[in-house]
Image (spheres, helix red, strand yellow):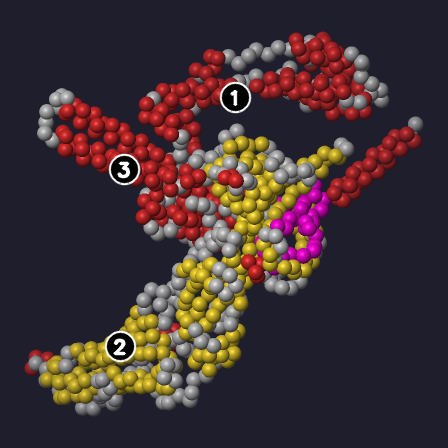
């Protein structure tokens, strides 16, 4: 009798051990693909796959020289094969190999919900990037940097030109048109705005050109660093006829950089302090006739073009011994963005201590002129100063010393430093200012003008009715009734050995149906004898050695369930105060919650906890998708984590919702620049010009409302004119005033129409921006089935008209439709229509 329990105990222990071992074997993380090749200069996708576990935080791969990672989102996949349940979490990274070299992603560990998972190392070799049908990236696009001269003097200002061009048929999308380049060891000015560029070297190629100026501080042979620019190139066309749409792929175009010979300056004469360029100098003494004790200002000003960052100050000056000298105050001024143009002035205050005529000596400034290949000296003339005796009242004190040694101003001249322009950076979070006006359909605008009160009452009644149904206390029992019916249906077809889970589900829902709160109720707690008998038979099948269930059990359970009828929800619940008047309380709670969320996000952002700030602002955006300031702040938090693609999408939404705020325009330009894409037509709206300036005055919803008010005003003006024409209004001022109002209303209507149309597809409440490059699928699944897929570049803008189990269907202006994962797109306004 003791052998059997001991055997059962050993079997249970062994089973538990095997289950634990199986669980340990199932938890893993790996790269997909685990190795192979990566195209140099082409943005590729690499997935970090977690099997039967979920990462605790956003994974951050180890840093690898020459390999750039960008987190593009996370997806979940659940599968049941032959009764085996498995789940994988895939984190997709956009990777860019920028060097022609092998790279190894080192092994690393990451914390998951089931403990630490070890990710094995992955080795990748370089491969050539191709554009479209096998054309190499070098043939499709090329970039280079050239200097105005292959040989320059150390400190000489010379011109740099950067060009990028693309062959015909690739229809490039330049995004913000900026490129990455490390200028060291050069010192350069800001690059100019890109200009159209065309070359006929190997066929017609068009692109952009940039210009700047630079200096090389030290002599030697310098090979400039290579450049890199993100460009979206067309790799094909999808669709037919009028519905064709170009497909784009993102590439990093490398640029060749020249070698420059920097010659050392010839042996310098006395007085040379490193200035190279073209300069002029002037001097002024004011006043030239004073009394003893009155101040004199001696100003010397140096101006010109040259290596201003190396010029620390003016040469020293000497003053006669009969003057007291006040500390000079050097002042440097330079035009905005001009690092090699400037003016340096120095004012010396002299106070004479005795009468007489004094000569201020001239000052020499020595510099090297690279155009003349020689040193030059320019002279700031001195001046003659006449000092008269002071008034008698001023001479009653002790006299000045008879002789004062000559004072050198070399020790008084302070070094001046060239001002440094601030680098482009992120702004500060914005305080919450309310929601943006959401775009609405034209017929909705008409109805809103005609029957706003009726729509509000109807909307209020619908929400109250839905809330009344949601608050019905019998809802849990109704849900239990439906689930119990489903369990009985499954029991009809389940084999004997697989019935246990369905019986347990039936018991759990039956307990809810009868209002029993006991965790494991006995059969006699059910008031109905028929249900009690069914419960006892289910217990015997579950927990006794005889697991057979009576053959008619399911039929009797179905009959008993059919008799258990719950009363329907009462319509009178609609008029309960908590259902009829919930909106004021909800609005107050939401406003308070919004302020708390905004405060929490700003506090976390200022303390450097950008992940917590992202979480707070994400919750605020989920609660109110039209809160443009929360969208803007969320973009800042994502940018601080180098998630530029997501930041660009949220910044685009903030810009569309409130384009008149300079902060939203700045953040969208910066984020889109870093992400390498800008949604159309926002690239046009963000540029200077009359159309962009007009459109940015209002959001699409604001222009709709402006147009509706303008139309109503025009109608009122026409009504006044009709009344005047028929003689009902005889005052003379009515007609001119009505005409003026009519003209103003028509102009406002035209402006509203132009401004609204300028936003294009983004003016639709269903508009989304796809921030992660991927595939547009014909059916909503990632399974390996035969289906049509189309390359979908990052920055694509479309309408989301349907949602299905984490997927959304996109509709493009050319008529093409397809499905993408919900996590790969950002809604500019609100949720999609189901």
> Where residue 574 sits in the image (x, y, percent)?
46, 16
Q: Which residue is mark 3?
A: 748
> Where residue 11 sits in the image (x, y, percent)?
86, 35
Q: Residue at x 44, y 61 (%)?
A: 197
Q: Tag 3, which secondary structure? A: helix
- Nearer-N-terminus badge (2/3): 2
Residue 529 in view in this figure:
yes
- Disc number lying in front (3 or 1): 3
Quarter that holds the N terminus: top right
- Disc number lying in front (2 or 3): 3
Q: Is residue 186 left or right of residue 28?
A: left
> Where residue 695 sits in the image (x, y, percent)?
34, 43
Q: Which residue is mark 1?
A: 470
Q: Find the distance from the CA under tag 1 to the CA under tag 2.
A: 81 Å
Q: Find the distance from the CA under tag 3 to the CA under tag 1.
A: 45 Å
Q: Find the distance from the CA under tag 2 to the CA under tag 3.
A: 54 Å
User: Is the residue 258 above or below the residue 616 in the image?
Assistant: below
Magenta region, residue range: 27-56
Q: Quadrant of residue 99?
A: bottom right
Q: Tag 2, which secondary structure? A: strand
Indicate which disc residue 301 carries: 2
Q: Residue at x 46, y 65 (%)?
A: 162
């Amino acid at each position: 009798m003791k052998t059997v329990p001991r055997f059962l105990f050993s079997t249970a222990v062994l089973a538990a051990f095997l289950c634990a071992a199986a669980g340990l074997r199932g938890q893993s993380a790996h790269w997909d693909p685990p190795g192979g090749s990566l195209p140099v200069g082409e943005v590729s996708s690499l997935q970090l796959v977690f099997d039967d576990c979920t990462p605790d935080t956003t994974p951050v791969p180890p840093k690898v020289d020459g390999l750039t990672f960008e987190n593009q989102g996370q997806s979940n996949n659940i599968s049941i094969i032959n009764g085996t349940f498995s789940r994988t979490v895939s984190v997709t990274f956009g990777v860019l190999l920028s060097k022609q070299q092998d790279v190894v992603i080192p092994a690393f560990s990451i914390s998951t919900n089931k403990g630490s998972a070890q990710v094995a190392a992955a080795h990748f070799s370089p491969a050539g990037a191709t554009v479209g049908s096998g054309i190499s990236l070098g043939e499709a696009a090329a970039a280079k940097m050239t200097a105005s001269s292959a040989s320059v003097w150390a400190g000489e200002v010379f011109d740099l030109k950067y060009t990028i061009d693309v062959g015909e048929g690739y229809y490039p999308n330049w995004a913000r048109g900026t490129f990455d380049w490390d200028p060291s060891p050069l010192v350069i000015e800001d690059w100019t705005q890109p200009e159209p560029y065309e070359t006929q070297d190997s066929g017609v190629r068009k692109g952009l050109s940039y210009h700047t100026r630079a200096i090389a501080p030290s002599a030697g042979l310098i090979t400039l660093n290579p450049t890199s620019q993100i460009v979206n190139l067309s790799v094909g066309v999808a669709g037919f006829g009028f519905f064709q749409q170009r497909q784009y792929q993102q590439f990093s175009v490398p640029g060749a950089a020249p070698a420059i010979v920097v010659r050392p300056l010839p042996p310098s004469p006395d007085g040379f302090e490193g200035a190279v360029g073209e300069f002029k100098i002037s001097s002024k003494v004011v006043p030239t006739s004073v009394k003893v004790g009155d101040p004199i200002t001696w100003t010397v000003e140096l101006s010109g073009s040259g290596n201003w960052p190396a010029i620390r100050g003016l040469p020293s000056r000497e003053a006669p011994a009969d003057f007291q000298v006040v500390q000079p105050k050097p002042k440097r001024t330079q035009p905005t963005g001009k690092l090699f143009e400037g003016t340096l002035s120095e004012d010396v205050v002299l106070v004479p201590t005795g009468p007489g005529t004094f000569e201020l000596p001239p000052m020499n400034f020595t510099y090297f002129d690279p155009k003349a290949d020689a040193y030059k000296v320019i002279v700031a003339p001195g001046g003659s100063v006449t000092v008269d005796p002071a008034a008698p009242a001023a001479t009653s004190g002790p006299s000045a010393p008879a002789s004062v040694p000559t004072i050198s101003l070399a020790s008084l001249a302070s070094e001046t430093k060239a001002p440094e322009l601030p680098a482009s950076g992120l702004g500060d979070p914005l305080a919450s200012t309310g929601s943006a006006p959401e775009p609405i359909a034209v017929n909705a605008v008409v109805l809103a003008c005609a029957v706003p009160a009726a729509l509000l009452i109807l909307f209020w009644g619908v929400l109250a009715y839905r809330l009344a149904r949601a608050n019905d206390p019998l809802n849990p029992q109704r849900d239990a009734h439906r689930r119990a019916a489903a369990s009985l249906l499954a029991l009809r077809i389940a084999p004997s050995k697989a019935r246990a889970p369905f019986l347990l589900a039936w018991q759990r829902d039956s307990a809810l149906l009868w209002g029993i709160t006991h965790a494991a109720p006995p059969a006699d707690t059910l008031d109905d004898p028929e249900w009690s008998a069914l419960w006892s038979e289910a217990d015997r099948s579950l927990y006794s050695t005889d697991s057979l269930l009576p053959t008619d059990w399911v039929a009797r359970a179905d009959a008993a369930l059919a008799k258990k009828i719950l009363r329907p929800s009462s319509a009178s619940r609609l008029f309960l105060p908590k259902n009829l008047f919930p909106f004021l309380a909800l609005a107050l709670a939401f406003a308070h919650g919004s302020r708390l969320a905004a405060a929490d996000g700003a506090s976390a952002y200022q303390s450097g906890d950008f992940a917590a700030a992202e979480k707070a602002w994400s919750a605020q955006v989920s609660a109110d998708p039209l809160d443009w300031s929360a969208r803007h702040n969320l973009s800042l938090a994502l940018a601080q984590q180098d998630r530029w693609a997501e930041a660009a999408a949220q910044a685009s939404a903030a810009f569309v919702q409130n384009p008149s705020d300079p902060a939203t325009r700045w953040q969208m330009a910066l984020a889109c620049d870093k992400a390498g894409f800008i949604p159309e037509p926002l690239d046009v709206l963000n540029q200077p010009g009359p159309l962009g300036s007009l459109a940015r005055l209002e959001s699409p919803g604001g222009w709709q409302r402006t147009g509706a008010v303008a139309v109503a005003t025009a109608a009122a003006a026409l009504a006044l004119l009709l009344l005047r024409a028929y003689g009902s209004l005889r005052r003379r001022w009515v007609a001119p005033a009505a005409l003026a109002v009519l003209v103003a209303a028509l102009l406002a209507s035209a402006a509203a129409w132009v401004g609204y149309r300028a936003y294009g597809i983004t003016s639709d409440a269903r508009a989304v921006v796809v921030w992660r490059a991927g595939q547009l699928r014909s059916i909503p699944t990632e399974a390996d089935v035969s289906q049509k897929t189309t390359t979908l570049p990052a920055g694509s803008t479309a309408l989301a008209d349907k949602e299905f189990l984490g997927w959304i269907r996109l509709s493009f202006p050319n008529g093409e439709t397809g499905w993408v994962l919900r996590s790969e797109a950002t809604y500019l306004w609100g949720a999609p229509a189901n």
